[in-house]
Image (tube, grey):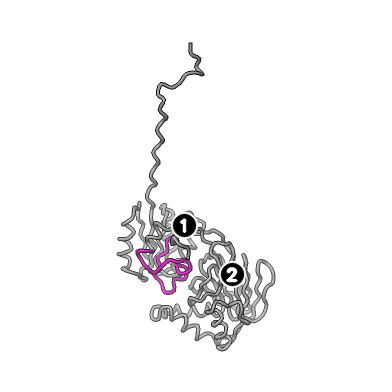
């Protein structure tokens, strides 16, 4: 009699491995500023996206960037996994603010004036390639900054920078494109400095008259100038710069240093790195984030938000 422990299965063949399940195609959402364009426009965008294997395609067009967050939240509620953001830095910023902390992936389609985030990430102003990166590019986690409760991906600023952007918003960008930033910058370089106090991670760092404070998450900021040469979008830190330049001559010297990639060598610039920045102004001033002007305030607080969103990037890092 054979003991039960010695029994062998009648069939010596191993069980066949289970067939791997094919991932379901992603549910895709398009958030588009309908007044912006690149390549063949939104009609070409739809054709390119539907050329890939997609699940549901959720399509939202908005007349202005401030209308975008509501559509983003609706798409998240409906299960969107991949977002194509069509527009400039303002549209992308509004969407990123709503997407922060979610698991969705972001594909940027640069259709604005400056497209600073796309430029810093190496995403070209080429519609088929931008769509390809969305579906086939590598995925990475992107840090964000948060100023007065609102997320940004590129930069935030107060002083000359904010005044310059507010001026450029008044129809100039539509007429002059990127030259609008140069034109408005020249108009404001003669502006007065403002008394302010700046704290870095809770420590006093600057007190005195200054004309501009910039907080950057990436290196290239307003006007396409490389202000923060060592900035990384995934290191958990924000770059901080303050300028005391006053008048056209000092600003010409400062911008010359910035254009040469030597901003920190200017006698009118200080640059450091922080996770939290607090700025207290003696008089109210407007501030900006990612090229969008905001109302005047007497105090701003900026914090780093590490690994806040997932972005689709080119195969070769920028």
Is label 2 in a helix, a strand or a loop? Answer: strand
Q: Residue 251: image x %, image y %?
A: 56, 85
Q: Residue at x 41, y 71 (%)?
A: 112
Identify which residue is drawn at 33% across, 63% down.
45
Closest to the observer, 231 or 24:
231
Q: Looking at the image, is mark 1 or mark 2 earlier in the sequence? A: 1
Residue 62 occupies which quadrant of the picture? bottom left
292 to 183, vertically: above or below? above
Residue 187, relative to residue 39: is it above or below? below
Tell me the element at label 1.
strand
**Which contiguous range is marked in magenta?**
106-129
Tell me if 43 is positioned left or right of 102 in this view.
Answer: left
Residue 261 lies in the magenta stretch: no
Asked where in the image residue 81 lies, by quadrant, the reply is bottom left
Q: Which mark is residue 139?
A: 1
Q: Observer-nearest residue: 72 or 220?
A: 220
Q: Which mark is residue 255?
A: none
Residue indicated by mark 2 = 239
- Image coords of residue 172 (percent x, y): 42, 81
Distance (Cα) linking label 1 and label 2: 24 Å
Asked if 185 appears above or below 238 in the picture, the reply is: below
Residue 9 position within the rendered picture, expressed as x and y whole percent measured from the top left:
43, 22
Q: Are marks 1 and 2 in contact (CB under 8 Å)?
A: no
């Amino acid at each position: 009699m054979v003991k039960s422990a010695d029994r062998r299965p009648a069939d010596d063949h191993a069980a066949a491995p289970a067939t791997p399940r094919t991932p379901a195609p992603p549910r895709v959402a398009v958030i588009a500023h309908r007044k912006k364009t690149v390549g063949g426009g939104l009609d070409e965008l739809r054709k390119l996206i539907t050329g890939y294997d997609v699940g549901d395609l959720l399509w939202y067009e908005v007349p202005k960037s401030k209308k975008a967050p509501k559509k983003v939240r609706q798409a998240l509620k409906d299960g969107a996994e991949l977002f194509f953001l069509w527009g400039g830095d303002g549209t992308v910023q509004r969407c990123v603010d709503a997407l922060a902390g979610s698991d969705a992936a972001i594909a940027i389609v640069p259709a604005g004036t400056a497209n600073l985030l796309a430029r810093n990430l190496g995403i070209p102003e080429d519609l088929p390639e931008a769509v390809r990166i969305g579906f086939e590019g590598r995925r990475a986690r992107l840090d964000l900054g948060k100023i007065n409760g609102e997320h940004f991906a590129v930069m935030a600023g107060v002083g000359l920078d904010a005044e310059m952007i507010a001026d450029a918003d008044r129809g100039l960008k539509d007429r002059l494109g990127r030259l609008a930033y140069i034109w408005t910058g020249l108009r404001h370089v003669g502006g007065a400095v403002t008394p302010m106090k700046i704290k870095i991670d809770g420590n006093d760092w600057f007190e005195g008259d200054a004309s501009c404070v910039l907080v950057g998450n990436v290196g290239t900021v307003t006007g396409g100038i490389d202000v923060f040469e060592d900035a990384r979008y995934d290191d958990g830190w924000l770059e901080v710069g303050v300028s005391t330049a006053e008048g056209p001559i000092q600003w010409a010297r400062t911008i010359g240093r910035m254009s040469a990639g030597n901003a920190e060598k200017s006698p009118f610039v200080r640059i450091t790195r922080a996770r939290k920045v607090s700025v207290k102004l003696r008089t109210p001033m407007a501030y900006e984030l990612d090229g969008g002007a905001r109302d005047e305030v007497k105090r701003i607080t900026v914090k780093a938000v590490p690994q806040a969103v997932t972005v689709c990037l080119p195969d070769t890092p920028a």
